[in-house]
């Protein structure tokens, strides 16, 4: 197994008695080697609900629980997890209500302490009302508007409000509001007729509530500790039954025996055979042929190329037996990014972020991407003599982009030619690996197409440089084009028949337009380089025009460069992907392969 080519895969066909499956499956999953061949789409609806419950508890407890083996039935797992979630939510709702009631009592106590005369006059100013629940929001707005102290408790379909006011006029306003909101006076249900009695009752209720909250919190703590203790077992079982669903999607189950098949990497085949032998299972296996899109691919993991693998995966996985273009992709991608984002200062900022990411557990996997892109930008920054958009500080090792526009355009087109040729060569190699000789010669980017593309570049270049006479060069170009057309038509007629063969042969004329567009597309590399230089240097023109000096000039430079790094960095990042995906991968990359996903717990 390496980064470029997938590890060799063996296909296993296994026959097992139905009563043995519950004992075989855990051992197969523990080995983490069998990629089951699915015949139907797995049904994860039931297990998905339990996974959401696990995520809920991990978020609530802010903990990533490990998996510990303790197998239980799915019914038991479902019942325990669901009931625990329901009970936990009820506990949290009860705690919220208790905390709200404690806050209410504390507010009233503070109110009495602020207005000592209240117990003497409260019997005239305490108001109880019932308000329909749909008017609670509006009632609360009135309470805030008139500066009242109030709270409510839900009672059947109404909200029972308890309000206190020291101003008789405010009390009259409240009577009008309650009447407007279809409320009812609730005073006759109040047991307290004197303010002093109410104050004493609130104090008693406060201490009783505090004691109840202490006992309640002890119960919640014990319940949470029990959940945390069982969570690793739940997590193991949820993972196990998800893998069981995957297994069910690939098994033929009869009355007495079940048949299933899948793929095993060569490095794990010996241990897997031992598992099958230990369980006395019948099995057959053979090495898979290259080029089948259903066969999973497994490449050697690489922490350095990990981010580039993620980008390649956005396009797709290579087929089994075909090569993984991640190394070539990384080189081309970094080159294009650095060319368009060439600045020593901006590149150093990206590299600094890459170094910081090395120390972050969450972002460490992206560190190498930032380091490579930052390094490429710094190299081109040295070549172009640019430091945070300033082209006067340092001397370029090569030239300044604005002073050599023709070289920039030529370099961008030359990069496109190299990428196109490389893509065609990889396509030819891939067809050779597949042993498809016809496609190797006559594919859209086969040998005939590559020769045609090279002659369209080399012959005009030789004429321009005076190496070939113009008349001879044109005749040679026409002669080679006609020859290639005849060869393509001849072999297409033999393979496809006269009508289709002639049609396919005439596509040679379309090649010219396609190859031209594939090459000219890289002019955008020069355009984005010049745009980056212009946008970066604009800050100095602004400083000069506004006559800024000292601290204000430094602040503008800092924020302007942050803006350039974020905007231009994102644009160049996307454009580099666009060019590699559509101008490079499209020529050779058969990205319909399956990712290796074994049954694993």
Image (tube, rainbow, N blue to C red):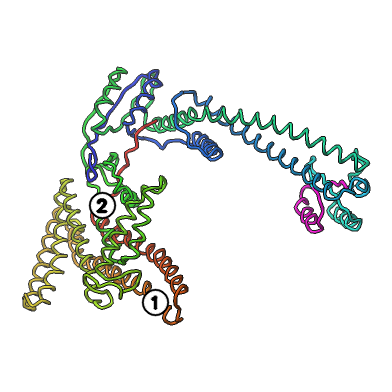
Relative to 342, does residue 324 appear above or below in the rendering? above
Element under label 1? helix
* Residue 74 x %, y %: 50, 26
Is residue 171 left or right of 524 when viewed as pictured?
Answer: right
The residue drawn where x is 24% and y is 44% is: 3
Residue underneath mark 1: 540
Residue 329, quarter of the rendered image:
bottom left
Q: Nearer the viewer, residue 375 or 239?
A: 375
State which quarter of the image contains the N terminus: top left
Residue underneath mark 2: 589
Question: In the rendered picture of this protein, how many numbered marks are placed on residues?
Answer: 2
Q: Nearer the viewer, residue 252 or 161?
A: 161
State which quarter of the image contains the C terminus: top left
Q: Nearer the viewer, residue 254 or 447?
A: 447
* Residue 553 x %, y %: 44, 74
**Which stretch did the figure color magenta?**
126-150
* Residue 239 x %, y %: 44, 32
Q: Is residue 492 visible?
A: no
Is residue 445 left or right of 196 when viewed as pictured?
Answer: left
Whether 134 is among the magenta residues is yes
Element under label 2? loop
The residue drawn where x is 12% and y is 69% is: 458
Tell which tag, 1 or 2, sits nearer the viewer: 1
Is residue 295 left or right of 182 when viewed as pictured?
Answer: left
Whether 125 is among the magenta residues is no
Q: Is residue 320 visible?
A: yes
Crowd around label 1: few <14 · some 14–19 · many ≥20 (10 Å): some
Earlier-in-chain disc, 1 versus 2: 1
* Residue 411 x %, y %: 22, 69
The residue drawn where x is 23% and y is 42% is: 2
């Amino acid at each position: 197994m390496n980064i470029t080519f997938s590890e060799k895969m063996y296909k296993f066909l296994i026959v097992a008695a139905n009563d043995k499956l519950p004992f075989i499956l855990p051992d197969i999953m523990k080995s983490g080697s069998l990629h089951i061949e699915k015949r139907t789409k797995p049904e994860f609806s039931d297990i998905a609900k339990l996974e959401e419950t696990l995520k809920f508890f991990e978020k609530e407890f802010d903990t990533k629980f490990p998996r510990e083996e303790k197998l239980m039935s799915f019914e038991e797992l479902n019942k325990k997890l669901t009931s625990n979630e329901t009970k936990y939510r009820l506990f949290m709702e009860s705690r919220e209500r208790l905390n709200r009631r404690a806050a209410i009592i504390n507010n009233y106590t503070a109110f009495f302490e602020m207005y000592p005369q209240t117990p003497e006059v409260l019997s005239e100013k305490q108001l109880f009302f019932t308000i329909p629940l749909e008017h609670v929001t509006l009632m609360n707005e009135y309470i805030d508007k008139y500066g009242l102290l109030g709270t409510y408790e839900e009672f059947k379909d109404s909200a029972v409000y308890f309000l206190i006011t020291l101003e008789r006029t405010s009390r009259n306003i409240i009577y009008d509001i309650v009447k407007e909101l279809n409320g009812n006076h609730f005073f006759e249900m109040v047991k307290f007729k004197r303010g002093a009695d109410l104050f004493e009752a609130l104090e008693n209720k406060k201490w009783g509530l505090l004691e109840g909250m202490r006992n309640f919190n002890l119960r919640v703590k014990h319940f949470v500790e029990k959940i945390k203790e069982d969570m690793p077992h739940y997590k193991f079982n949820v993972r196990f039954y998800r893998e069981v669903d995957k297994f069910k999607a690939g098994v033929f189950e009869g009355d007495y025996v079940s048949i299933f098949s899948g793929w095993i990497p060569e490095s794990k085949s010996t241990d897997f055979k031992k598992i099958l032998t230990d369980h006395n299972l019948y099995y057959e296996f053979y090495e898979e042929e290259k080029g089948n899109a259903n066969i999973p691919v497994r490449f050697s993991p690489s922490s350095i190329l990990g981010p580039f693998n993620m980008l390649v995966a956005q396009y797709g996985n290579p087929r089994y037996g075909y090569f993984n273009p991640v190394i070539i992709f990384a080189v081309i991608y970094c080159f294009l990014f650095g060319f368009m984002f060439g600045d020593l200062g901006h590149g150093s900022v990206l590299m600094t972020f890459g170094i910081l990411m090395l120390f972050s557990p969450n972002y460490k996997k992206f560190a190498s991407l930032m380091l490579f892109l930052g390094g490429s930008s710094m190299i081109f920054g040295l070549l172009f003599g640019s430091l945070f958009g300033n082209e006067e500080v340092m001397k370029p090792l090569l030239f300044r982009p604005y002073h050599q526009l023709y070289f920039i355009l030529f370099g961008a087109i030359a990069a496109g030619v190299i990428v196109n040729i490389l893509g065609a060569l990889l396509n030819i190699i891939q067809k050779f690996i597949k042993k498809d000789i016809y496609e190797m010669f006559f594919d859209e980017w086969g040998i005939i197409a590559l020769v045609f593309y090279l002659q369209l570049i080399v012959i005009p270049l030789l004429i321009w440089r005076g190496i070939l006479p113009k008349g001879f060069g044109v005749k040679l170009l026409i002669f080679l084009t006609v020859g290639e057309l005849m060869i393509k038509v001849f072999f297409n007629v033999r393979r496809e028949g006269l009508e289709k063969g002639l049609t396919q042969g005439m596509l040679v004329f379309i090649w010219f337009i396609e190859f031209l567009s594939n090459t000219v597309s890289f002019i955008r590399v020069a355009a984005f380089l010049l745009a980056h230089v212009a946008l970066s240097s604009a800050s100095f023109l602004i400083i000069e025009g506004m006559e800024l000096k000292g601290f204000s000039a430094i602040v503008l430079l800092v924020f302007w460069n942050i803006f350039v790094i974020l905007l231009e960095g994102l644009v160049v990042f996307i454009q580099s992907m666009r060019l590699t995906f559509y101008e490079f991968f499209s020529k050779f990359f058969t990205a319909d392969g399956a990712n290796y996903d074994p049954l694993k717990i």
